[in-house]
Amino acid sequence: MTPFLDVQHLSKSFGALTLFHDISFSIGEGQRIGLIARNGTGKSTLLSILAGKEGYDSGEMIFKSGLKVGFLEQKPSFDPEESVLDACFNHEGEPEKVLRAKQVLTQLKIRDLNQRMGQLSGGQQKRVALANVLLTDPDLLILDEPTNHLDLEMIEWLEGYLSRGNKTLLMVTHDRFFLDHVCNLILELDDQTLYTYRGNYAYYLEKSEHRIEVARAEVARAVNLYRRELEWMRRMPQARGHKARYREEAFYELEQKAKQRIEERQMRLKSRNVYIGSKIFECQYVSKSYADHVLLKDFYYNFARFEKMGIVGNNGTGKSTFIKLLLGLIPPDSGRFDIGETVRFGYFSQEGLQFRQDQKVIDVVRDIADYIDLGGGRHFTASQFLQYFLFTPEQQYNYVYKLSGGELRKLYLCTVLMRNPNFLVLDEPTNDLDIQTLQILEEYLSDFPGCVIVVSHDRYFMDKVVDHLLVFQGEGRIDDFPGNYTQYREWQSMKSKAESSTGDKAEKREKVSYRSESKRKMTYKEKTEFAQLERDIAALESEQREIEEALCGGSTSVEEITRLSKRLPELKDELDEKSMRWLELSELTN
C-alpha cells in the first residue's frame, strides 16, 4: 500500500483549549477513512490543517511527492457572480470536462450550468462544491460532512461513487449508514488522543466499546493503587533518598491516570410528566402548490397518539412545507389541520439558530426554564440537562460565540427540548450533530412519552427512532408505509425484482407461443398439468399484487408486514418453479 500522507506528532490549540496533542497517523492508497469525534473537539480543524487551509502548533505532515488533494469544506464560499460551470472548473471548461460535469451535477440535482452562484441556496452551493471536488479527480479526497444538504437519492449515489474503484479519502460525516458502506478504517479523536479501528462503522462500535471497558478497568485499578501510594506519600513528607524518588515520580503518573475521566452515562432521561390527549391532529384533504409545482393534493391523514413518524423524500417534494402547514406557519391552499387541544409542539427547524453571542450557554437554557419536571418528585436542572447532552460544566459557562457549528445546533436542540413539549417536530435534526449526540438523541426519543415527527435523510437515525413513514414522491403523491426506512427499502427492492421478473416471464411466454409447431404433442396428462399451471400462475401473481398493495397501503400492522415480507420471496420461488415448467410444456403442441 503506497503511503499518501504521514502525520507525525501533530498538536493544535486555541488559547487554553487543546484540540489534539501529539497525534500520529497515516493515510495509504485505497484507504477510505472516517473521522469520528464530538462536536468542538477539532474534526473540521484537523481536516483544514491537512488541506493546508489552517496552521498547527507542532508536528509534521509528509505528503507523497506530487499528491493532488481535493478538499470539501463544511461551508464553501464562491464568487456570487460566477456561473455553476465556472465554479466547477475554475473557468477551464473543456468540452469533455463539461460533459462529465453535467453528469455529476445532474446526479446532485444541479441542472442549470449557467446559473450564477449567488442565486443558489447554501445547500445547492455545497453540492456544487462537492461536484467540484469530485470532478478535479484528486489522489486524496478530504470531505467535511459530504452528505449534508443531499437527499436520500443523492446520498445513495455518492455512496456508490465513493465505494467504486481504488479511491482514497478521509471524511467527517454523521451519517452512520454512509460510514458503514463506504469506509474501511475509522479514526476516533477522543480526549485529545487518536484511536484507529481497521474496519467499518459496525466494527468500530464493537471495538470502541471494548476499548472503553478496558480503560475503565485500568482507571479503577489505578484508583485503588493511588489510595495506597497516597498514604505512603503522606507518611514520608521529608526529603527522600534516591531509591524512593522513582516511586515518587511514579506516584504523580499514577495520580494523573487515577484522575482520568472515562465518561459513563448510566442515567436515562425518562419523563413521566408529559401528557397528551387521544386527539392529536387530523390532516383534512390539504392541498398546497407553488406556481405549477404541486406539493400536496387533497392529502388526508389522522395522526395517532404516541406515533413516531418519519418523513422522507427527495429535496423539493414538500417535506418541510408539510411541517410548516401543520404548525400553522404557512396557510394551505385548501383543506385544514384539526389539532387536539392538549398538543404542545416543540419545533426544531433548519433555520432556528438565533442566539445572543455574548450570552453564556447555561443562561441560554435557563432563560427558558431552570429545570424540567420529570414527575414523581424528580427534577432535571438546566445544568444537568446540558450535561446529559454532553456539554461539560466548563462548556456551560463558555460564551455562545465560542461554540462550533455542531455545538450551536446541539444547544438549539436543548432549548427546544427544555420547553418540555408533548409533540416534537424535528426538521433535519441530525445535520452537524456528532455521532455521540445522535446516540443520546435516539435514546431520548425512544423514551419520549409523546408524539414525534422527524424529517431526515439520516437512514440510521430513522431506523432507530420511527416506526412509520410518509414517503413524499413529488407532484403531490405521498405514500404511507408502516415500517422504518430499511424495511421500506427492502420492500422497494422486492417490488422492483418482482415487477422485473413478471415482465421477463410474460416476454418469454409471448416468444414461446410463436415457436415452431414441429415439436411432439402433449399427452393428456401434460395438457391437464398445463391448464392447472396457468391457473396456479394467475393465482400466485394475484397474491403477489395483493401483498405489494398491503405493504404500501398504510393500514397493515407491523406483525403482518413481517409475515408478508417473508411470504413474498417464497411466492417468487413458487412462481419461478411453475413458470419454468409452463415454459417446458409450452414447447410442445396441443
Image (cartoon, helix red, strand yellow):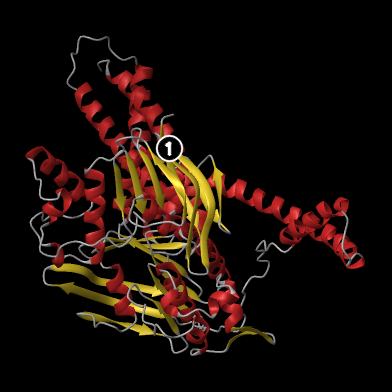
Residue 164, by quadrant, is top left
**Which image quarter is the C terminus in?**
top left
Would residue 542 be visible to someone looking at this image?
no
Residue in the image at 33% along x and 77% along y? 283
Quadrant of the rendered image containing residue 484: bottom left
Q: Nearer the viewer, residue 158 or 233?
A: 233
Residue 371's x, y, as percent? 59, 87
Residue at horizontal 49 percent and vertical 90 percent from the top? 367
Residue 428 appears in the rendering: yes
x then y, percent, for residue 471: 33, 60
Q: Secondary structure at mark 1?
A: loop
Q: Which residue is depicted at the point 11% across and 41% down?
A: 99
Is residue 581 positioned above or below 326 on the image? above
- Give the camera-side residue of 66 and 438: 66
- 134 vs 94, left or right, is right
Compared across the picture, whether 250 is left or right of 433 comes to right
Residue at which label 1 appears = 31
Residue at the right extreme of this rendering: 235
Counting from the top left corner in percent of width and height, residue 562 is at: 50, 50
Q: Amino acid at mark 1?
A: Gln
Q: Position of residue 529 (x, y in %)?
A: 38, 24
Q: Between residue 524 and residue 371, name the one nearer to us.
A: 371
Q: Give the position of the N terminus as an image quadrant.
A: top left
